[in-house]
Amino acid sequence: MSVQLDETRVALIDRMLDNVMVWLDGRRMAEVLMPFQRAILRQFSATIRSDDGALWYRRGLLHMAKKNAKTLLLILDAMITLHTDKPMGHKGCQIIYVANDQNQADENLDFTKKLYRVNPILMDEVVIKSNIIEKKDAMGYIEIVASKNVDALHGRSYRKLEWDELHAQADYRLLEALELDPTRPDAQQLFASYSPLTPKPGTPIVDMLRQSHEGLDPRLFVFSRSGSIEEANPAMGGPLGSTKEEIEHARVRLPTWHYRRLYQNLPGQGADSAYDAVAIEACVVKGRRSLPPLPGRSYVAFVDMSGGGADDSTVAVAHLENGKAVLDLILDQGPRTGGVFSPDAAVKKFADVLRLYGCHTVQGDRFAGHWPRDSFDRYGIQYDVADQNRSQIYATAEPLINAGTVEFLDHPQMISQFIGLVRRGDKIDHPLGEHDDFSNACGGALILASRVHRAPYMLNFTTGKPFSYRDLIARGLD
């Protein structure tokens, strides 16, 4: 099916944002919106079928972390539609805005009223009532309700349904009450959400993301961003977005499994979670980013290599101390160019780091056949294939974590990946669409360290200092 943007609708949206609507402080709305936010409004509301001009998207989902103006986008979409749309036939432009609870409904209604009051051109066209903003010509309205009151709207026909915080819906009961009217080809639903605390299949937000990922519904528009704070927060640093400093400060205040959901837009702890988030948090040494190499200490290392595409290459170094496997370092290949990086450059970087820690061997999986072995060998590092795959590594690491016999670095991405791991039958893996590069390298290094029975220690009587592990290797005394 061929689709395109309806230039007339696009022009109306742009005119509203550029020339008519202003923000609360008097700035033009176009000055506070970022390009991706304008693009969302255009794409969802102005994409049509090329053959007959019918609206293409029936449903839409804005899936981002907190503080990315999702609520504002819902309200703007409602206001622009109310004042520019020409409903089919004589049905009118009914817009129903659903909030999670009564408090949120009241807040969103107050927010919408404030926007109207600073926009006198639009205000002149409506009458504001208790929970309805109604066109004076009786051709449409915005009705804001709490989700607990949705049952009373059962069977209502509408032009648009705007639903905030979809993650709060554990089933389809309320959505079924406001299902799309099959007799209205112009009816649309737009949802806003961040990831749920319990990512359970059969819930609206989880099902919608799966449908998008698998391409099951071409008439579903999804704008989804998750992962690092940069990836999950496209409005960060913008006129209405949080600063990176504010988001990082939230990590200090919140448990990791809440932080990853609110600010990285990653699922919380579900029933299929492989690890206990509380146990992982207890193993983190707060504020410890890395530990320097020390003489007389025996280090082990594990790498998770990739081909330079979407997955990172990572290396982790660990040692055994007082019966605990301690993570000393974890890092990736570094910056990308055009979204990719050089695998050979990553090997060289890792080899340089491994030599600093006296690691002349490193373990990893069977990725790319002999390539890792040959590549590390060029830099004097022996690459050994691990005796466990990543699922087995995670299974072996679990009791160590639960017993508190490991020390994690304070590395948000690694911690988030561990917390996000899920069980699939008898295997442990990362969720669909996510990554586990840091957690895999870390788990492998910590298991190697836990197997070390003693750290080699010999005194150099000439200097009065212990031999370094590198010296012991050179002397064949390891």
Image: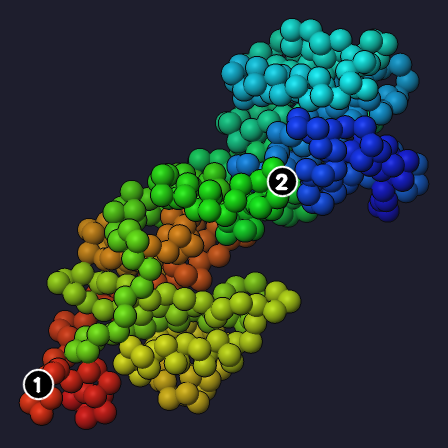
Q: Tell me the number on the disc at residue 239.
A: 2
Give the SS element for disc 1: loop
Q: Quadrant of the C terminus?
A: bottom left
Q: Position of residue 310 (x, y in %)?
A: 57, 63
Q: Residue at x 31, y 79 (%)?
A: 356
Can see residue 256? yes
**Crowd tier of the residue under label 2, counting other residues whose Cα lies within 10 Å: few below 14, some 14–19, many 20 or above:** few
**Spatial CA span between label 1 and label 2:** 61 Å
Q: Does residue 290 appear to the left or right of 12 in the view shown?
A: left
Can see residue 74? no
Q: Tell me the number on the disc at residue 456.
A: none
Callout 2, which amino acid? Pro
Q: Residue at x 62, y 21 (%)?
A: 111
Q: Position of residue 446 (x, y in %)?
A: 27, 64
Disc with the residue nearer the chain's start (1 vs 2): 2
Q: Quadrant of residue 328?
A: bottom left
Give the SS element for disc 2: loop
Callout 1, which amino acid? Gly
Q: Does residue 30 appear to the left or right of 385 in the view shown?
A: right
Q: Does residue 169 appear to the left or right of 154 in the view shown?
A: left
The residue labelled by disc 1 is: 464
Q: Quadrant of residue 350?
A: bottom left
Q: Can you say whether 32 is above or below 292 in the image?
A: above
Q: Residue at x 85, y 25 (%)?
A: 84
Q: Residue furthest top?
A: 130
**Crowd tier of the residue under label 1, counting other residues whose Cα lies within 10 Å: few below 14, some 14–19, many 20 or above:** few
Q: Position of residue 372 (x, y in %)?
A: 45, 80
